[in-house]
Amino acid sequence: MAFLDVEYSLTGRTWQGPSAETERLGLAMAQTTQLPEALCRVLARLGVSADAVSQYMAPTLRDLLPDPRSMKDMEKATARFLHAVKHRQRVAIFADYDVDGGSSAALLIAWLRSMGREATLYIPDRIDEGYGPNVPAMQALARDHDLIVCVDCGTLSHEPIAAAKAADVIVLDHHLGGETLPDCHAVVNPNRQDESGDLAHLCAAAVVFLMLVEAGRQLRDDGAKGPDLMALLDLVALATVADVAPLIGVNRALVRQGLAVMARRERPGLVALSDVSRMDTAPTSYSLGFVLGPRVNAGGRVGKADLGARLLATADPHEARALADMLDHLNTERREIEAAVRAAAMAQAEERGLDAPLVWAAGAGWHPGVVGIVASRLKEATNRPAVVIGLADGEGKGSGRSVTGVDLGASIHKVAAEGLLIKGGGHKMAAGLTVAEDKLEAAMARLSELLERQGAGQSGPAVLRIDSPLMPGAATPELIEQLEAAGPYGAGAPGPRFALPSCKINFAKRIGESHLKLTISDGMNGRLQAICFGAYDSDLGPRLEAHNGAPFHLAGRLELNHWQGRTSAQLRLEDAAPASAG
């Protein structure tokens, strides 16, 4: 049964409340712990038991950090890395051009710098070279270096790694591995096929961090000391959130501690990026994913590929400011390019039909740097896996995004293995591919067939999940602080969402082009400010602005609003439905 009987909201979604079991566990937890029931329902939904609440609310690396040696090749990779450091060998870092790759590279560069060593940074150009190691680049690096460390890439790069005969190669990655591994010194990857999968949720930067933990252990065994690893956790947190790694297990502790490190404002690159982004509050997982992350990514998407990694690695505040300004400008340019591609892709997808298991679109000249973001928008609009491809010179390079319960990466990997794609792979929720233009239709048909077997396209209207009903007067700063303590939230641990039933709209005003500001009440003494971004991109804005005194069920997330030295509760409104429809 739909929550508050909302089967089709103003944004076309069905509201789904907590299960009876979650409600029961939440109520029991509230009685045991004396915490607010709204918070306890969230904890129950996250799988936290009443006796584990204290530990969950304060996750520590001491309790949650896995033994690095539990991953295959870890000791071998670390020993080779430290050998290069000790003997002053020439080291090159080959990194992916996204936030995870840039953060991974910056981790190694910062660690090496603390040890009095330098490394060559190499980031491939997204358009000219594509994702991962390539033969010319690896051959060139091998001529001038003794060790090449591939981060956030390399697990499937058999030929390019084989071409680097003159140097040893270490791979530190997290992408899905194939049946065979490249012939190199070591491959450390929790998603190797011969791994247990217990650490499959780690991003590449977390894998790099664990290697540095192991490096510290090996140094101590030799009577030496390594750099302060805790100071590097801001980079691990940024990568974990930006790469949409699930915030479960050790990832929660890494992000939680990383946010605290970032709040100290000690890394010039992140300080400059925060300032140019006009971040005036302590960093949150939201700011990592939606404010800082897109700007770091902008260089790899539409500018020079190494800008993000250079920003994260630099120790010079002046260079950091110049790079941050450049990335901020490129991010604005990226948004403009994205808007044009998104309009064309949506029109094409609508013409093809939005009721298939896979929604896809391809266009000549579509910038490869924005196809992943546009795929996300198509997925959100249709509640189906989506792939968007840019075509050039008879070849298409694309990105895909999936929905919960549908493993897109594995399906793309299978289509590639069958020969319909030139290459492809990724994660459950995000993947990339390269396809010959004359095989495009066949490849997408096959991918659609594989995704349909997993249940894609059979879910009906999109679902908006609600944790609990809440009256406006109960939405206090104290409750929000308690909810934040149960975070961070993100992939694998969605943030709390509440439904405010039968609210009266006391004030409604359009802000800018498409936003709506509201004051709502429960008809008694409880009042709450609300903001709805992009309200006029759907029926939400017009219907709420023209409320005519009618009550509405409102749904969204609670946040703290800091204004002129005062802190108050605010609802970030996501959806609404006429109360009279219930």
Image (cartoon, rainbow, N blue to C red):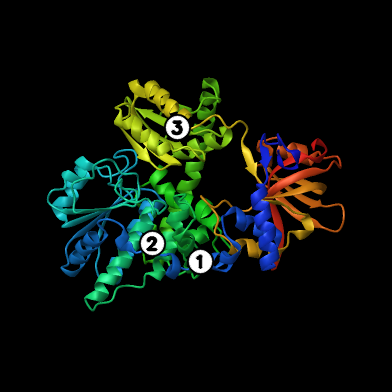
Considering the image in quadrants, where does the C terminus appear?
top right
User: Which circle marks residue 319 in the picture?
Assistant: 2
Q: Is residue 233 visible?
A: yes
Q: Which residue sits at x=42%, y=23%?
A: 445
Question: Residue 388: which disc?
Answer: 3
Q: Sequence-wise, which precedes: disc 2 or disc 3?
A: 2
The residue depicted at 51 percent of the width and 31 percent of the height is 456
Q: Is residue 559 visible?
A: no
Q: What is the secondary structure assignment of the residue under circle 3?
A: strand
Type of amino acid under label 2: Glu
Could you tell me residue 181's position as x and y percent?
23, 45
Q: Quadrant of residue 109?
A: bottom left
Q: Which residue is mark 1?
A: 59
> Helix, strand, or loop for circle 2?
helix
Residue found at the far left of this picture: 166
Mark 2 or 3: in front is 3
Quarter of the rendering containing residue 482: bottom right
State the residue in front, 521 or 344. Answer: 521
Give the x, y percent position of residue 232.
Answer: 39, 66
Residue 315, given in percent of the width and then of the height, sits at 36, 66
The answer to whether residue 285 is left or right of residue 134 is right
The disc labelled 3 sits on which kind of residue?
Answer: Val
Q: Residue at x 63, y 39 (%)?
A: 463
Up-down: is 570 above or below 499? Answer: below
Quarter of the image with the N terminus is top right
